[in-house]
Amino acid sequence: MRQLTNIFWLAGKELKSVLGDPVMVILILWSFIVAVILEASGAGDTVYNAAIAILDEDGSMLSRQIADALGPPWFQPPVMVTPDQVGPEMDAGRIMFVLAFPPGFEADVISGLMPVAQLEVDATAVSQAQLGTDYIVSILASETRAFLSGNPDAPDPALRLELRRAFNPNGNPVWFKSVSSLLNQLSLLTIALTGAAMLREREKGTIEHLMVMPLTPLEIALSKVLANVVVVLAAFTLSLMFVVQGLLKVPVSGSVALLLSGTAIYLAAAAAIGMFLGTMARSMAQFALLVIMVIIPIIMLSGGMGAIESQPDIVQRLTLVLPSRHFLAFAKAVVFRGAGLGAVWFELSLMAGLGLAFFVASLLLFRRSMSLSG
Amino acid sequence: MKPAAVTDDTVASIEAVSHRYGKITALDGLTLDIPAGRMVGLIGPDGVGKSTLMGLISGAKRLQAGHVETLGGDMSSTRHRTGIGRRIAFMPQGLGKNLYHDLSIRENLEFFGKLFGQSRSERAARIEHLTGATGLAPFLDRPAGKLSGGMKQKLGLCAALIHDPDFLLLDEPTTGVDPLSRRQFWDLIDTIRKDRPVMSVLVSTAYMEEAGRFEHLIAMNEGRVLAEASPADLMTQTGTDNVGAAFVALLGGEIADPQDTPPTAPTPATDVGPPAIKADGLTKRFGDFTAVDTVSFEITRGEIFGFLGSNGCGKTTTMKMLTGLTPATEGEAWIFGQPVDAQNLDARRRVGFMSQSFSLYGELTVRENLLLHARLFHLGAILTAERMADLVPRFGLKPYLDQGAASLPLGVRQRLSLAVAVIHAPDILILDEPTSGVDPQARDAFWDMLTDLARREHVTIFISTHFMDEGMRCDRISLMHAGKVLVTDAPQAIIAARGMETLEDAFVAHMLDAMPQDVSAGDPGLTVIETPVTTTKAPRFSFRRLLAYTTREATQVRRDPVRLVFSFIGSAILLLIMSFGISQEVREIPFAAFDQDQSPESRAYLSGFEESDWFLERPRIRDAATLERRMASGELALVLQIPPDFGVSVRRGEMAEVAALIDGTDTNRAGTVESYVEGAHTHVLTQGTQSALALTGLAPSRASPVRLEPRFHYNPAMESLPAIGPAIPPLLLLLFPAILMAVSVAREKEIGTITNFYVTPTGRAEFLIGKQLVYIAITLLNFIILTVLVVTILDVPLKGSPAALVLGALLYAVAATGYGLLVSMMASTQVTAVFAAAILSVMPTLQFSGMITPVSSLEGPARILGTLWPTTWYMGLSVGTFTKGLGISELSSHLLRLAAFGPILTLLAVLALRKQEK
């Protein structure tokens, strides 16, 4: 009880100090409004607006019809190129695909000779190259079939594959992007805020003051976690309601209460990481480097910028210790699949467990850093 | 040509000058003339505007209102300021504040010499003379940070005198310095003045007893001049016999002479228990440095016990050991007979501690600070109210109750700190330099409160101070120097034992006994010899000055290799994890079949998926409810649903349909899965000639009438590594240098060495670019490390032009550090610099520079941001040289664009940098 009231009063002080610092408030607003909107609305599908060129040596109706069919949203309206432009344009990265029709292409199609169209692909971006090629193959096939049958609606093959997407029927990329962007903001801010709170108190010497009062390091640490979690959770809630659900119109199919509870658990874990870095760093410069070292894997390897299954096994095992990976799995399940507690308890307990581990580690470091700072 | 000595009789004149910091007024319509060729003392407590005034006269601070003329010219004119930069020397307040603590004495002086364009031989001669005169010569290679306070101040003086200034401004040069070094310091100034009588000196001090040495005194309080006269006149005017008393008289108050009113003897504690505090052989070592050396003492209950000594003599460390904040290396301490135990919370309730920095929360009000502490000590509502009712009027806090603690005058902050420390009525009060920087009157009042606490409430008080007059008010004191206790006794007894007049004399005598070998006063026979001053006019831009900053920064970086190693190893680790971790190949897509038909045809169709490496089969689904549940759990990325009449339709050659249900949460992955499903579907139809499906004659005839032959350029095997590997260094080579650069500039602002830029003839570009060069070099070194790793460990060959890559890296390094410089212009502290640099650069670098999504596929503001971000262009260049094998000519447009970022960002930073402090 005594401990709880201590934590409560200390957290109140922390809250005032976070909100009293205009730089922090501006950064929080920037992160949860501007950054989320930029990230979510910025990135399209994997293949989106890809630059494509046509090298048309046939100049036939069919080649023009195919060229016309290649367009938004996957491709930019195709540009016409001459053979000697292909190399330089691709080298400069201005053009990703070049579709070349040989002379007599249309005639060969009509006579059933199965002519070959060449596709030059810039394969430096592997997934765009692969997926774009698949799209072009299927557009080429359906347009040719339509051309042959003289029917704008191409006849289907007898065995038809019907593709349906669950949880995001239109495949709107903003939905997923906004959730992964929220994760990025949550992580960066919570880690940086909590760590800085730790460092700031040490810089001003007030930490010593706390240490000579009848307070345990546990209470001091918990109060910092609590205060920063409250601030970021409030910002997250507002961002979820007004930016994600409101402005970006992303539906949340699961329980918002469950989402917020899970977010609180993740934030506690992230705050523990921040505490850990804040106690480990001896100076602001070191802290900054540590934050960068942690935040890059969190943003890039938690599943927001590439599926977890595609990581090599060894990296998959490494990313298991990132609470952010489990948070993203949890958030996806609740927001899109409408999952209940029964489906996400495992992720939740993993986050809690990892958070606890980081917290204990930073507590151990805390005492040690106090004696070193003297 | 160097002008002759200032012939006017004023070296600076100030007219109606006001200066404010936010709500606080530092100077209030000040008008004043500083006489030339004399030693003028500015006296007054902290926070009355002495430092502000000095900053304005020297040109370090920007004038807000009024008129300042220094050395015969208007200080609001940039041209005049630049012109007289070489004739002024300013030593800011704080021990070694403008020195570089990681540089040696010689390196520090070399740096200052270079700023004034001195040649190598001239510098050597001057350094020899100055260090000889100050007694620093034997320690030339010792880092400034490891010097004692007195030596630091002597070094600061050497740095100030390196260019023979006509006007020397010293802001509290002796505060916190031990009494022996203080005397040596003033003697030194006297000697120098004898040699160069034309030099005007303006000096401020908080020690009133020192003020008697000055020729002319200016007494200040609350931003105004109280009086201006020689010390003798001042004392006559006020009818006092010392400057301190004269000053208090000017303030309109009275101060008791501690010598006349020895404190009443402590009332002996009624119960004869263990001593309140006992220390036995306390020792603290940090590495090979002994901060506290076998310190022992006993403090009885109700006693006022003082630790007297200079800054850095081990007072604070001893107090920290007593409070359990830091463990003792050797020795033991007891509080009320209990060994000091950091874990013992009950013991902490009996102790009140006031640390050096006045541990208050500036963002809380006076009331909130008091309440917070009462709550943390669990005083309960009634007791809290009682204590507040007692303490608030007693410490004079009533008028300030709802003010933020940060905006309080120093004296009030100090009273609040004491109130906070005693709110829980502790038995022991440990106060670490509680009166540092507080005016004499407030100090006097503070001591009355302490004496009251000790005498009336029998609180044991353990206090540290560097003021001798405060030592006199203690029951007993320990004189401390260099970690050792020289003597412990009642102050009068210490004086008597040495047969001295004052405590200061006794202290000096003890110090001379204890450590004659460390700090010598300097060779009295060797005085500063005037070396001919370089006569060239200061050029507007000087490479020597720029390189002086570069050399200095590089030395500093070398001295603190942790940061460097950290960023090198950190970026290497990140490169490896990211390159292997970010794979764009989707494999082993978990899928389950929901086969409602169970015919040979349906099984044949599904086997095409089961055999593929792309898909990983999970247990089959039997009913619709399971399908929903398993999809919702996220276990499956794909479900293939085959309707009941599938086999029949296929056999009849009728239209049959298979449904692929794809988890659409991750839209990027869903897109990839979709295309894989279509691919596998086509494969089953066209290649599956041996299967049951082929027998139906369904597929081959339906094959496409055209074929597409894709040729994958640059990365024919479609591997992830060659695509990702070269894309990682561009991220790291922006984030790490930008942050290091921003912190480096913000650090100078925060610790105060930026003053050297303000008051020397250094140009803005010289300062910034000088520093930047070092970080460009570090970035290039990091680039080499990362490139070697990409080629060797990641095994991605560099197919294109190495020259293009290196040139690009150089331009990129300029851009990254230029960005860091620009960010640092927004920040005044390292925390802000770090936050701004990290939060503002992580997103565009990771998300909008083409790493995962090509910039051309971005939309709206994100695309604009991506185009205007240097990483995008270096990313294209890195991928272009590694994967596409391009040369300089093909990459010329990338190089040109990259080349624009650095100079523009750096130029913006140079323009944003102010040559004066606000």
Image (cartoon, coloured by chain):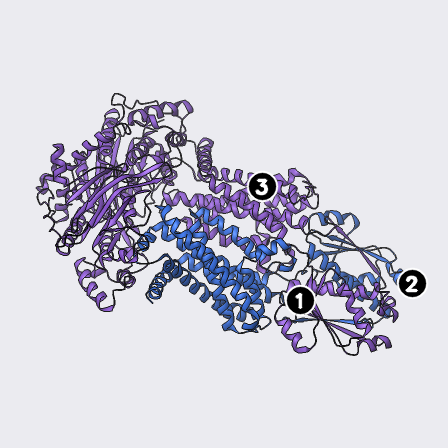
Q: Amino acid at mark 2?
A: Ser
- Please tell me how crowded label 2 is: few (under 14), some (14-19), or many (20+) other residues with Cα within 10 Å: few
Residue in front for this viewpoint, B180 or B216: B180
Both on one chain, marks 3 and 2?
no
Mark 2–mark 1 CB contact (< 8 Å): no
- Colour of chain A in the rendered structure image: blue
Label 2 – label 1 distance at C-alpha = 42 Å
- Please tell me how crowded label 1 is: few (under 14), some (14-19), or many (20+) other residues with Cα within 10 Å: many
Q: Can residue B160 be seen here?
A: yes
Find disc 1 in the rendering and name its residue.
B637
Under circle 2, the secondary element is loop
Foreground mark, 3 or 2, reads 3
Residue at 33% over, 43% down = B61
In this picture, residue A340 sits left or right of residue B910 = right
Chain name for mark 1: B
Q: Position of residue B578 (x, y in %)?
A: 60, 51
